[in-house]
Amino acid sequence: MCGIVGLFLKDKALEPKLGEMLSGMLITMTDRGPDSAGIAIYGQAQKGRKKLTVQSGGGLADYASLQSDLATFLGSEIKVTANDTHAVIDVAEDQAQELRELLSEKHVDIRVMSQGESIEIYKEVGLPGEVLERFHVPSMAGSHGIGHTRMATESAVTTDGAHPYSTGPDQCLVHNGSLSNHNALRRKLTRNGIKIESENDTEVGAAYLTWKMLQGDSLREALESSLKDLDGFFTFVVGTKDGFGVLRDPIACKPAVLAETDQFVAFGSEYRALVNLPSIEDARVWEPEPATVYFWSH
Amino acid sequence: MLSYDLAAEGLRGLNEALQAQSADINQAHWDVINPKGSHAIAVGLDAPIDVTVHGSTGYYCGGMNKQANIRVKGSVGPGVCENMMSGKVVIEGDASQYAGATGHGGLLVIKGNASSRCGISMKGINIVVHGNIGHMSAFMAQAGNLVVCGDAGDALGDSLYEAHLFVRGSVKSLGADCVEKEIRPEHIAVLSDLLAQAESDAKPKEFKRYGSARKLYNFDVDSNTSY
């Protein structure tokens, strides 16, 4: 089943409340999937800086010593802010790639969840309420975010199997459904040099979008080609630095509701997820059409 | 008139109270407030009572309805009136997928649009949609009437049995074994009656009728590309 939500704010006055609003939406979707939960949240970008959200495969990591190790290797200012099993690493823009290589060589138990100017991803096994509380998501601010609560079908219940999946710098994907050609596609993408870390079908969907965009497609074009190349059921919500988008497969059996007001655009697997948003009774509420890309950006 | 606050008093209490009306009606009019997209509101009713839901609902509103008149002042999620037997249900907003699925009887009116699979496997229910319907509607529909005042999506009436389909606007595509048929006076009479009951002012003569070509009832090697 799975439950997915997305919230894109038009009204800047609501930005301090993004985490609280998004958390409320995702918690309402708990009974669509109790296995694991995650969110991607887009906050303030800092000029000349990049941030990586990392997760420790071995539980609570010693992020203080990670910070001093990384600073020694890179020879520059670096800041590691721990948040439970995750941490956000703030690094100079031109050293982000070097940092990733360093992490994959010398810190194999540290997994990169996301990289970009404004994206942060937090995900773990557990109920949405518990996971969001662990990472203090309700107190986070931001311009937009997406969330997922999982009922596992295609791979094990692990942090790796939880959504969102990052599809590239400042990009991420959540998925309700199941892809049936993910094994063949995983082999094809791997042969093309795309790194896929889990056995999960959605990560293959995310990697597919990354691959298409590396070939020069825009996100909209990549989503449109996915209708042809991905076999299975999906309602996708994607996040980018500036906005968020929605796409349903042509059969469209996975539910989806959109709502728009002057203050926000919101997505929910069900209308229930949207009922506590401000002035929802005056919103334009509709079901997105099958095989149609919807996108909003700042 | 009894007002039931779903957010405060819970779903189980509502359905128990409404279902209890079947033996002995002591309350003929019900208002349900604060539905907030909840699932399975007013299901399994079996009494000639009036229920008005003030707001939008989630999955399966009005499922298995017998006799009751239900009006939703909002939109409904997937599976509204699934397996309805009799009675009348009016949705003032839109309906999500498989509205009226497998329904045996009664009238379902959707004043907005219905999405995919509207009337799938319908077995005698009448459905009137004031707006448009989505793809794969009336798939394997066996009996009853589906009336669409707007447009129909792809694959209308695929593998249709004996349900009658009436569409006023365009049909994006017809499903396997579904064809346009002549509209005769007896069809105009049925349509006039349903449109009146559905509070629609559409004119019966503006509709086209679609039905089964009856070529897929039994396996026929000459039709093997149509299955």
Image (tube, rainbow, N blue to C red):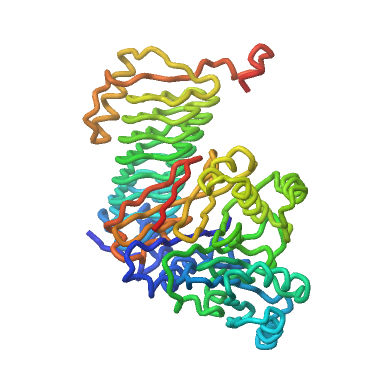
Compared with A98, A220 (above or below) is above
Residue shown at 60%/58% (left/top)? A168
Query: Residue A244, position in %: x, y?
Result: 46, 56
Whole-percent x, y for residue B113 in the image: 35, 39
Q: Is residue A179 left or right of residue A121?
A: right
Question: Is A217 located above or below residue B166 in the figure?
Answer: below
- Residue at x 70% of width, y 84% of height: A72
Looking at this view, is B2 or B61 the one in front?
Answer: B61
Residue A150 vs A48, above or below: the answer is above
Q: How many marks?
A: 0
Which of the two residues, A183 or A219, is positioned nearer the viewer here? A219
Measured as percent of width and height from the top left, residue A205 is found at 63, 51
Task: Look at the image and tell me whether residue A80 can be seen.
Answer: no
Give coordinates of residue A51: x percent, y percent: 57, 72
Kindly indicate the quadrant of the structure image that contains residue A232: top right
Q: Front-most of A189 and A180?
A: A189
The answer to whether residue A253 shows anywhere in this view is yes
The residue located at (72%, 62%) in the rendering is: A156
- Quadrant in which residue A278 is drawn: bottom left
Q: Is residue B207 left or right of residue B43?
A: left
Q: Quadrant of the N terminus of chain B?
A: bottom left
In the rendered image, which quarter is residue A230 located in? top right
- Asked whether B90 or A273 is in front, the reply is A273
Q: From the image, which quarter does the C terminus of chain B lie in?
A: top right
